[in-house]
Image (tube, rainbow, N blue to C red):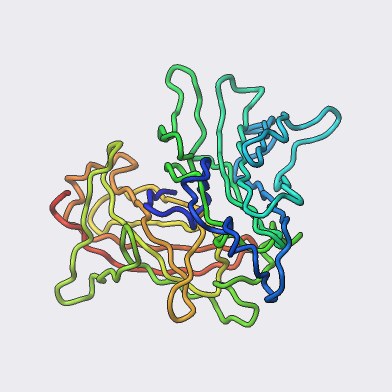
Amino acid sequence: MTADRASRGRAFGLLIASAVIGGGACGDADRSNGPDGGVQSDTGTVVVGVTTGLRVGTDFDRLRVVLRAGGAPIRDETLPRTGEALALPLELSFAGRPSGELVYVELTATSSAVSGLHVTRKASTRVVGGRSLLLRVSLDAACVAVDAPGGVQPPTCEALQTCAAGACVGVAVDPSALEPYTPTWAKGGVADRCRPAAGGPPEVVLGQGQADFLPLDDCSAGSPEPAQLEAGPQGGHHIWLAVRMKNLHQSGSITTVRGHFHDHPKDPWDMAVIFTFEPDEGGYCKLYGIRYQLDTNGIAIAEVAGKRIDLAVEVKDADGTIGVGKRCVVLSDTIL
């Protein structure tokens, strides 16, 4: 998911209102110099790259696309067009837009076979003059809603939030967190700050933290510091996890957390999120504020408080490259 986080500007969440983005690439000083030190162009391009883990044509077969630029609507249609087939990945382009302009996309997938089924994702960012940037947006299975008696419902998000990987995240990302657009983006073939072209094998370290990456003691330590259990705002109990990695892509990588209890017959459900990593020291990149819920799959929190759990975090690129980090963790016997 959110894996709730205070600063999902590095994630797939983006902004609806210009006041929320604040700064970024919209000031005159930002437009004065281009990447090569020369005068930067007054226009730029943002390409929205739409992906999904859902089955196109089976889980949903229609996709409403709403695009706005500078607050004005520029496209509102439902795909597929007559005579065409709906297929993802999909590119939606804001081409040749003024530098600093706020661009916004809203996607709603529906099914002609299942009444009331829908999944919505919103995203926005700013255009950077002289650059063509990729804004990755995913339609996630954990955000599917079915408006019917007994139907499933994703989290209810506030006005400036959207559902991503089953959690509410901000609708905005700073353009500095976006990667350059390349036609091979869906194959994960472009180098970036977290996966340089001359990088080595993937490295993944599992840690903890809601607002930053912090070390996480292993069970093998003499007196390991427990991972603190917290009660969630919408029910359930979780711990905050964080990840450091290198030689895996900064954006579009799927981060999956898996847990196995030493002394309980059931394990919590896996959790997968698609969030953009932040550059960190030593050539690493970090991701924090991953809310991993322990009392899923019929587990009562009282049954596992204070117990040991083996945690594994997997970071998987779109091209299939995988890195894994593991920790044996002791849960706290208190709940905040």
Residue displayed at 71% across by 74% down: 38
Most distant residue in the right direction: 83
Q: Is residue 284 above or below residue 230?
A: below
| 216 displayed left or right of 251 | left
Determine if residue 26 is in view: yes
Residue displayed at 42% across by 35% down: 157
Image coords of residue 154 (percent x, y)? 44, 34
* Quarter of the rendering containing residue 111: top right
Image coords of residue 324 (percent x, y)? 46, 68
* Quarter of the rendering containing residue 85: top right
Q: Is residue 87 above or below residue 275?
A: above
Image coords of residue 195 (percent x, y)? 58, 73
| 329 displayed left or right of 254 | left
| 303 displayed left or right of 171 | left
Task: Judge by depth and name the residue closer to the eye, 259 or 209.
Answer: 209
Task: Judge by depth and name the residue closer to the eye, 75 or 50.
Answer: 75
* Quarter of the rendering containing residue 288: bottom left
Residue displayed at 67% across by 63% down: 180
Image coords of residue 16 (percent x, y)? 53, 41
Residue displayed at 63% across by 45% down: 103
Q: How many marks?
A: 0
